Image: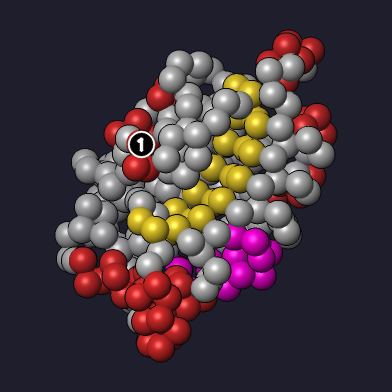
Amino acid sequence: MAHSESLVALNGTQISYIGHDCKDIPDFLGETYGQLARRLDVSFNQLRSLAGLKMFTELEELVADNNLLGNDLRLPRLPNLHTLTLNKNQLTDIEALLEHLADVTPSLEYLSLLGNEACPNQLVSLDKDEDDYQRYRYFVLHKLPQLKFLDTRKVTKKEVMEAQARGAFMKVVKPKAEAAPNEAGSESNPLPYTPLPRGSRDARNHKGVFAKCRYVYYGKHSEGNRFIRNDQL
């Protein structure tokens, strides 16, 4: 991978591996950058597993949007991870995911799950409304009370208090397993609408939700890859 050395020289702590259609995180990424990387973007692949993160022991920010991650998702323990975005994957079991994150990402403060059935939203499921989404926020904050930012909104003091008082009873029922093949979110029929910022739908112009930074690019799409805060869109 000698051709990657010139890219690493730009900023060896921020790595991007976007749009390679890989199902797993390549071993060479961890072997080469695992001890150095603080931010990793593996969006717009076909990832079904994040087991390859085991060598990224110092990771602080992980962006894994637009992949095929499902309810069997398992992360290695990442004690320094404070930002995690899993937008537009195939997550449906919110409780199992949150319990796992509480166990392996104790420093997590910024989380985004937009575009998953686990995150009820009218743009994902027409039978969901703002009340469903608010109940989801209370439940997430009950499980992860240290969060400061969830999806596209800051966590408010009122939400924290409500989550402490009633969050345990706010779980939104997950979709039935026998969903029709052409139901929203299926791989063969992508959603006509998405709650994500426009740029996040295009691997050539991938915008994250939480941070603005310059990072090492290791991918096919090289234009416009910059992370910006949601309030700067």
The magenta span reads: 93-108
Write the residue at 28% across / 47% down. 195
Q: Mark 1: which amino acid?
A: Gln
Q: Residue at x 73, y 26 (%)?
A: 12
Q: Nearer the viewer, residue 82 or 84?
A: 82
- Horizontal placement of 194 versus 226: left or right? left
Q: Is residue 117 left or right of residue 129?
A: right
Other-residue count near label 1 (Cα within 10 Å), few / some / many at <14 / 14–19 / ≥20 = few
Is residue 49 visible from the viewing direction of this image? Answer: yes
Q: Residue 111, how many percent across, how many down?
A: 49, 56
Quarter of the view holding residue 175: bottom left
Tell me: residue 225, above or below residue 54.
Answer: above
- Residue shown at 55%/31% (left/top)? 213
| Percent coordinates x, y for residue 75 in the rendering | 66, 57
Of helix, strand and loop, which mostly describes the magenta segment? helix
Q: Is residue 201 left or right of residue 9?
A: left
Q: The C terminus appears in which quarter of the rendering?
A: top left
In-front residue for pair 223/148 = 148
Please identify the quarter of the rendering in which residue 102 is found: bottom right
Q: Nearer the viewer, residue 124 or 167?
A: 167
Q: Is residue 178 magenta?
A: no
Q: Name the residue: 31% across, 75% down.
A: 135
Label 1: element kind: helix
Image quarter where the N terminus lies is top right
Residue 164 place in picture, x, y as percent: 45, 84
Q: Is residue 74 left or right of residue 55?
A: left
How is the structure coloured here?
secondary structure
Along the viewing direction, whichever of 32 and 231 lies nearer the viewer: 231
Q: Is residue 29 visible?
A: no
Tell me where residue 196 appears, x and y as whole percent: 32, 43
In reply to whether residue 98 is colored magenta, the answer given is: yes
- The residue singled out by tag 1 in the image is 232
